Image (cartoon, rainbow, N blue to C red):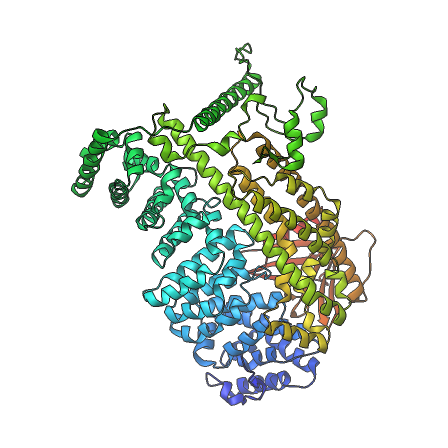
Amino acid sequence: MSNIDTSNIPFDSLIIETLGEKENMACKMVNNLLHSEDEEQILTGLDKIMDNARLQEIIYKVKPTYYLFLLDKEFEHQDDVHDTVVEILRSMDREYSDYIERLLQYDEYATKILARFLENVETTEYNKKSILFTVKNMTKHKQYAATWYTLMPSVMMEYSPNSENRQIAAYILDQMVGLGQPAQVNFIKNNGLVRISNIFETNETENINTGIVLLMKTFLLRDKSVLKVFNQYLQKTDIFGRLANFLDVLQKDDLLTLVKLLSILIMSGENTEVYVESGIMLYLISLIEFPFKNGVNGDTVSIAFQIIQYVFYNPNTKNKTNEYGFTSKLVQAIRNYKSLSSASLDVVLNTVMNMMNEPELRDQFVFFKCRDEVERVFANFTDKQKAMAKTILANIEVVERTIQKVQVTDEKAQTDMQKVLGSIKYAEEKRAQSQKDSDDVISPTKTPDIPRTKHEPFVVNLNPTSQKEIPPKAESPQPKFQAAKKRDSINGRKTFLAERKSFRLSKGHDVTLELQNLPEFSQIASTTSKITVDDAKVIAELNMKKEKRKLIIQEMYTTEKTYVTQMEKFVSSVLPTLLSLMPPAAQMVGNYKNIFDLHKMFFEKLEKRFLAQKTDPLIVVSDLFMELFEKKELGDEYLKYLSNSEGALKYNFSAYSPQMKQQVMKWGQSCIILPNFLILPVQRLPRYILLLETLIKHTPEVAQEEYGALKDVYALGKKVTMQIDSEKKKIVKKQTLDNYEKSTTNYQPNAGRSFIRDGVMSVKGKSKMAGTVVLMSDVLLVLSKKKNTFVIKYSIDLNAIKIVPNDSNSSLRTIQLLPEKGKEGQLTMFFPVDVDFDGWLADLRNTKK
């Protein structure tokens, strides 16, 4: 956005309401101070506005550019000037309910100034947040949407994983995109879908929800040609895969919003095949259970049926549901028709009616006794539903008269299937027995003498060291499994590698290999094998788990590939130049290459395994992650990097030198944004934990070796990440204390002092000001900043004050620090809605204990 010299706007053109003679004189006097070449004079003028309610009444009558123009200028005391200007704007907004409306109506310069201020790399996160709250208030005034909508590109820069302001930016973008097609097009052109994908990468529920809502607003279009173009952009991202994963983690209203989005996207373009490939179909089928799963409601299930129906009607995808028991879900829906709306039941019956055209599916409906369920509830159907039900019954009757069940399941597959089912049944019995034994121990009224099964019990052991206390079994591991751990296979078939340390089944009940040879679900329904409906559902669920597992491991592979590729780009193209122009950056990002080297080696092994086993039903990854998490250098390098990452992400690299500023601009022209690279290691370890947790969920327990090994890896990974996080917090607090000690003029150190928190806010002692407030274990400092040096404005001994909070006004709460003796040294801290009042109050009180 081009610069406008807002400092030379004539005073008279800024007046909105006629000023009285005295008002005009006061206003001009302050105006002269604000336009002074002396920064102290400028700060004096700003302080007068901050601290004088009568003067604020006068300022209300002129355009906000009267003082906002200072945001366009550079100062030696830049933070002090900008902090105060922003605080005046927020204060005026709080005091006058129509202040922002007047700004939009009368001030043609203000939004342009605010846009440039948001885009300025030297603007602090706090001030950006304050401006975004002002923009949020602008969105309440739809009649001026044409004015505040122009801020979209500036706001989008804050919709980023490395921005602390991403949530409020998401709210504003939601309001903007909702204005209609021009706004939706603008959002897409400004890489909105890429930004949503990056936000999804955080895997934080709040970020996921804002991204989903933004997608919904973006794709609510009537123009099909524009929608088709939007859809092409969407398919170039990894968003569909992300949405599939979210189906597995979101619940209740969040989950319902997601399936509503999926229903919009399935109708907005040729997405049916993408739904199958990304796993969305699998997860939707998994949602459908009666009674409903925890966190799933009838509306969610109803929409899921509607989406699956679209996929079925596509000739290229209609057979993709055959192996995962979707026919069983439809029959369950008919049985539980009261749980669904009439419209949803229409969808169910219509889907069954159309699926009857497929021979394999007809056999499945017969197998699941669809006729019995339809006849049982037929009388309760509407006329339309009865017509569809009659067609279904007629089809089933034809099938039952003519079906010839001559197809026989492969003998090996039959044997494996029965062994798997037997192992599952055994596991369920042991789990029930274990629960009963537990109840007996804690319930003195029960008889402890309970008959025991001859089968070996489970061994639950999450502490690997205690394994040494268990006497070794007489029978040693089979030699072929020992050899397999070296060559990754037995007679050409892949096996599970890591040693078992938790949740043991007895020797005869591990069915890892048999799971790879299960018959297809459609084959079961049309064979002469004697298998119950419940067993068929179990096989369908196992097949679904195996397919989901493939998708999760594929995500592990693709995200690791992207991670390593991005890191390599930074290490080879950016890091050498950065360290050359700015040697102190080595303290912040000097070990970035070491982390890259670790992941490069890990990815090489992961890629080799994935490519070798990607056609196998059960790909093994536990041993690879165990090896990674056991590396001492992993914890050391991540701790070193993460301890400096917060400062690096907030650091204004452009301000280091003119050469650095020019280089940052050059990188920006090539879409190289430093924070986007610096945040990569911050996100990676937590992502591993989430992926492993999901993988465990979709690994059958009866696949004993890999299931148990994954649980061990997950426990170790979580322990490593928690230790890193705990140590990082200690280091960061010590670093922050040291930084304030070095950069604050006349700072008085205390050997026992510790840093607690800091932030920019308004305070009032002798006069009102905006400054950096630093809370330490024994003292509270209010600092003014001059370049990179802090000056102490107030120093409050926390041992000599009492704390008086006031939250009666929710829009502006306060905390008073009153001296226990005398009146000197009183300080009031002001907390608008976006500042953590409760956290500050709790920490202040803790210093008094």
Residue 550: tell me if it is visible. Answer: yes
648 vs 622, nearest the viewer: 622
* Residue drawn at (27%, 32%) of the image: 370
Quadrant hosting residue 664: bottom right
Question: Residue 815: where, in percent of width, then height?
Answer: 62, 57
Q: Where is residue 849 in the image (x, y as percent from the top left)?
A: 71, 46
Front-most of residues 566 and 775 = 566
| 234 left or right, relative to 5 | left
Q: Where is residue 647 in the image (x, y as percent from the top left)?
A: 69, 61
Q: In this view, does 100 lie to the left or right of 374?
A: right
Residue at image x 70%, y 84%?
38
Q: Residue at x 52, y 36 (%)?
A: 699
Residue farthest along the front direction in this orientation: 491
Q: In which quarter of the image is residue 659?
A: bottom right
Using the image, determine if residue 351 lies above or below residue 189: above
Q: In this view, does 279 lie above or below 363?
A: below
